[in-house]
Structures are given as C-alpha cells and as structure tokens.
Image (tube, helix red, strand yellow):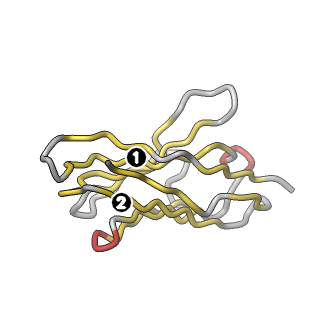
Amino acid sequence: QVQLVESGGGLVQPGGSLRLSCAASGSIFRIYTMAWYRQAPGKQRELVAAITSGGMTNYADSVKGRFTISRDNAKNTVYLQMNSLKPEDTAAYSCNADIMGSDYRGLDAWGQGTLVTVSS
C-alpha cells in the first residue's frame, strides 16, 4: 500500500509565500513523475507543475516564474514553493505520483489535498 501525505497549506496574504510538501510512503519500488494539481471551487482540476525522476519540470503558464517544483528522491518527497501568491491561486492542492510498487505493479497515487487560501 502506498500513501501520499501533503502538508504546508494555509492562509496567506496576496504577495506572500507558502511551501507545500508531499511525502510518499509504503511499498514503493520506484517513483517516476511527481506533480501538483489544484482545483478551485467551481472549476476543473488543473496541473500546476510536474517533475520527472530526472528533474525535468513543467509548469502551468499561470504559475511560471512564481512557483518552483522540486523533489528529494532519497526522501520520496516533492515540494512546491509558491511565491508572489495571488487570490486566484486559492484552491485545494493535491499531490500526484506515478509509482511502481514493490510488487512491480504501476500505481497512480493521490494525496488527500491541502487547502491554500490567498486573501487579505
């Protein structure tokens, strides 16, 4: 069994910063791409940023230059540093990982989500 546990969400003023973390645990053989998604009220879930096991990244246009995704492969953890936050960044942020379990079966794993609210 594999779990993804996020942390770091909360309330922040416009222009502020937050850092999200997502740690994977359980019967893991290898983790491939890790990503952050978000879903605002009344909107569809969207990809925010993704990072491959080799460190290649891609970002949604709306967050380029403000958000940075990184990972620590030794800790099976992915991070999302969010700077210059705007009210439109308010959403539930979820971690996703493409994992091969110790049984060599593929798994598309999701965290439970963490709420980010940007408001004055």
Query: From the viewer's perspective, is 78 left or right of 64?
Result: left
| In the image, farthest residue toward the right | 120
Query: From the viewer's perspective, is 70 left or right of 106?
Result: right
Query: From the viewer's perspective, is 50 left or right of 40?
Result: left
Image quadrant in which you'd find residue 15: bottom right
From the viewer's side, name the closer residue of 37 and 21. Answer: 21
Which numbered tag is attached to residue 70? none
- Residue lying at 40% horizontally and 50% vertically, measured from the top left: 35
Query: From the viewer's perspective, is 57 left or right of 36?
Result: left
Which numbered tag is attached to residue 96? 1
- At which x and y percent is residue 99? 25, 49
Real-space CA distance between mark 1 and mark 2, rounded to the nearest whole angstrom: 13 Å
- At which x and y percent is residue 111? 47, 47
Label 2: which secondary element: strand
- Residue lying at 62% horizontally and 43% vertically, measured from the top left: 92
Which one is closest to the eye, mark 1 or mark 2? 2
Name the residue beneath numbered marker 2: 25
- At which x and y percent is residue 31? 25, 55
Q: Amino acid at mark 1?
A: Asn
- At which x and y percent is residue 104? 12, 46
As displayed, is residue 108 above or below residue 120? above
Mark 1 crowd level (few <14, some 14–19, many ≥20, 10 Å Cα) = many
Mark 2 crowd level (few <14, some 14–19, many ≥20, 10 Å Cα) = some
